[in-house]
Image (spheres, rainbow, N blue to C red):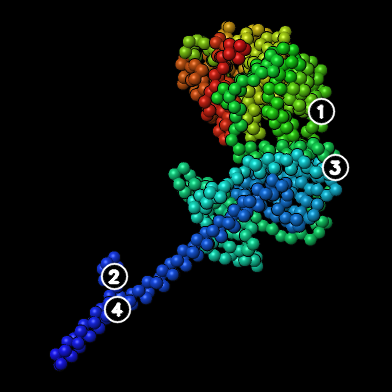
Amino acid sequence: MRILLNTRNENIKQDMAMQNENQTMATCDGRPHFCIRKKCWIRPLKWVLSLAIIITAGNWVVASRMLWKNYDRAVTCLAASAWPLNRGVMSLEVFELKPGANAPLNIVSARLSVFDDCFSVALTSPNNNIRANLYRDRKLHLCAPDKKTHFVADSTALDDTRRALAEISKEIPCFSWLGRLGINLALRPFITGIEHRNGAIGWRIRMMGGKAILAGNGDLRRMEFCPPSKTGWRATKTGWLVTISEKPLNSSGSSELTPPAGPSITVKGNELDLSLAAALRIGALQFQPIRKSADGEQSNGKGRLRVSNGNRALYVSGTPYEIGYQHGKLLKDSVHRVCRRLVYGVGLAYSLEKGKWFINEARALIERQRPYMDSAYFEEMRGLAEGSGVSLEEVQIGNIIPEFFHCSGVAVFGKATTRGQLVHARVLDYMTEVGLQDEAVVMAVERTGVLRFVNVGYAGFIGSVTGMNEKMIAIGEMGGRGEGFLDGTPMSFLLRGALEHAATLDEAVAYMRDRRRTCEYYYVISDGKIPDAVGIAATTGKFEVVRSGQAVAQLPEAVENAVLMSAGDRYRNLVQRVRERYGKIDGRALFEIIKRPVSMRSNLHDAIFEPQDLRIWVVNASRNEPACDQPPAIYEWKDLFR
């Protein structure tokens, strides 16, 4: 009995021991290492970590949504042509942050004041020397305070300006939710704190490459951002700072909405509307790639447009009206864009600078210059207008608009070149910011009764500043002071006339000398048949011919078998480069010679003529790089006129 009791007690003790062991030991991957005490803090730790992850993810989502809300708000305002506020004043400033700079560089400042249907916009860009104010009460007012300029038009719905804003909104990327997710993952925005400013509470957000401050309602107030470089996020890359502020406006009689008193010039409302729209479209070009035509060929009558690798070649043939009509029909959209940009966009800049409404001035100028121009050119412009659908007045103004060129020209031959051949380069430095390079075209013109010629130009422009004819005569122009005496033949039509009528170098010089000229311009004319070339310095009352190898006061460095025309350091660099390659120059070498700094940053197009082979090399600027840095397209005469 005692033995049985002892055995039973031993069994009970063993069961209790095993139970205690099970309670004190836990398995992890089959190994008894952790006790219940350790499990007591693992579970809360998991909850804490989960909560931290949820809070962090929520912070990231909220910060991302707040930033995208401002992006969508801006796009919506542009698309709907609506102000971002109904009553109030909004100020926007954009600064460029350059590494090592002492202070941010102010790029643009804008101030918008709105009270119901009345508004004012003040725009300042110190970097571009722009300061303009726009007001609308019962009328529309455009002012340039620094120039004491004030234009007034009957109030207009600003339909074309609204269309321009809507077009710009379409150019802004529209990201899918997947695209936005990728950007959010790359930028990793997070709310890092609360901002107290001017009695208001806002949010501080940090992200890769920058930081932002948002108002309590999520509206952007300040953003500093440095875009990533190709190798990643680097502090040495140029960044941007944007600041936005708002304040209330209590009355339509506020000084913010009152145009300045004083003398003003009355203009047509639709012209002011078109001018504002053109300025917006030109400004938006800086953020758009070059517009390239699709490869292919199309025809109209005897005319033909061929596009190869995005480069356009236009052949037109017939009477003045017929070649104008073919030109307009085959390049209709380009003609519209060029005329609007020149007549209204460039014209607006002229108006604000000079205090005279450009379109009114241009109308008078057409009639002043009509007696000195071949009537065939007016017939051609009529055909161009009817073919393109652009008004005749806009076509005429676009073709006589005063030019302000700063160019270079060089012709070398004989001992200077590899085979004694003539090679002639023309450098056009002019207004790359208005997008003429988007509308570039090489035109082969076969007009009845005159010499055939090739014109390196732009859609809608029938004059010539760069060209070569079938008799191996090549001409390029360089600007001097492009304003002054205007009662004469416009420069571009003077140059075209020489190409159409001159079979020799002497005839080309005589043609230009014997006609009534306008402003100060310089030319290089070459003749592949001799070969030889001359430079011309021409004003209304002076006509000076500079022979090859001849030194004059403005061009003191004479080089045998060469005519070199430029100005300042560009001229000195040109002379030095020609001397370094003397005797080894051909078309490709001449392209290297005219690169920067001979060409300017505003280098719009370059052409290399090889008159003896009737060949032309052409380059046009990209959006942000000069023409001299682009690969050339080569045009053979037989292909252009086939």
The residue positioned farthest toward the bottom in the image shown: 2
- Circle 2/circle 3 CB separation < 8 Å: no
Marks 3 and 4: which is nearer the front?
4
Which quarter of the picture shows residue 433? top right
Mark 4 element type: helix
Q: Is residue 478 above or below residue 20?
A: above
**Residue type pointed to by label 3:** Asp
| Sequence-wise first label, 3 or 4 | 4
Marks 1 and 4: which is nearer the front?
4
- Circle 1/circle 4 CB separation < 8 Å: no
**Residue type pointed to by label 2:** Thr
**Would you say residue 496 is visible in this rendering?**
no
Find disc 1 in the rendering and name its residue: 363
Which quarter of the picture shows residue 353? top right
The tag on residue 222 is none
Crowd around label 4: few <14 · some 14–19 · many ≥20 (10 Å)? few
What is the quadrant of the C terminus in the image?
Answer: top right
Q: Nearer the viewer, residue 306 or 46?
A: 46
Marks 2 and 3: which is nearer the front?
2
Residue located 72% across and 8% down the image: 449
